[in-house]
Image (cartoon, rainbow, N blue to C red):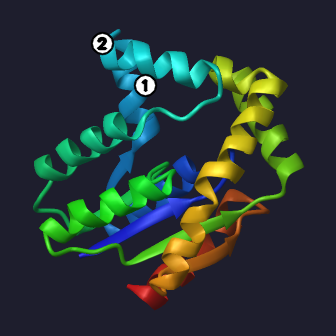
Amino acid sequence: MLNLVLFGPPGAGKGTQAEFLAKTFELNHVSTGDLLRTEIAAKTALGIEAKRKIDKGELVPDEIVVGMIKIKLEKNKDVNGFIFDGFPRTLEQAMALDKLLDENETPVTGMLRLEVEKQEVVIRLLNRGKISGRSDDQDRSIIENRITVYCQKTLPIIEYYKLQGKHFEVNGMGSVEEIAGRLKEVVEKIG
């Protein structure tokens, strides 16, 4: 089973590239963003709490996100593998993911880290905000906070996967096709 973590700052193109990898390698795409947006749209208690955090540029609490991932894994046991998009975002989530996958004897194969310059991330998010209407992509101060949170809480995951020999850095600058080609090449080597 091929289990990939697609990693990078907000606006790195994880969603677009995860869809490409899911199709190319026949993986189940697990997007915490999509899971959360579904809860927000349904105005569930989880969705209301998640929206409060997201609107401030903060991370949704681990127990909520890990619980959603666990349900997704349990419902999809007979797949070729998973591409995790937007998860894990904290060291605690990375350890929780390892525990969930170990229960099924299917560890993370590799963490693909999209490297994108900060200014490019800001531009991409502001442009996405104009198209999608997402409030968290329309305010530069919220975007800056999201990048700060990413640097503080999410970057430590890199070392976690490096120590396991599962960290693979991929240049996230360029066209969607160029980035997809680089990702495919790495996955073919590690898969």
Can you tell which quarter of the image residue 113 is in? bottom right
Q: Quadrant of the N terminus?
A: bottom left
- Where residue 96 appears, as percent x and y from the top left, is 31, 57
Secondary structure of residue under mark 1: helix
Please tell me how crowded label 2 is: few (under 14), some (14-19), or many (20+) other residues with Cα within 10 Å: few
Q: Tell me the number on the disc at residue 37.
A: 1
Q: Residue at x 49, y 71 (%)?
A: 111
Q: Are marks 1 and 2 in contact (CB under 8 Å)?
A: no
Q: Residue furthest top?
A: 43
* Residue 28 shows up from this direction: yes
The residue under the point 43% across, 34% down is 61
State the residue at coordinates (60%, 50%).
Answer: 153
Q: CA distance from mark 1 to mark 2?
A: 11 Å
Q: Is residue 171 above or below residue 37?
A: below
Looking at the image, which is closer to me, 154 or 124? 154
- Quadrant in which the C terminus is drawn: bottom left
The kind of residue tagged 1 is Arg
Q: Residue 33 versus residue 159: which sits nearer the camera?
A: 159
The residue drawn where x is 68% and y is 50% is 152
- Vertical comparison of 135 with 21: above or below: above
Mark 1 or 2: the one toward you: 2
Packing grade of label 1 (10 A; few <14, some 14-19, many >=20) is: some
From this view, report whether residue 58 is shown above or below residue 133: below
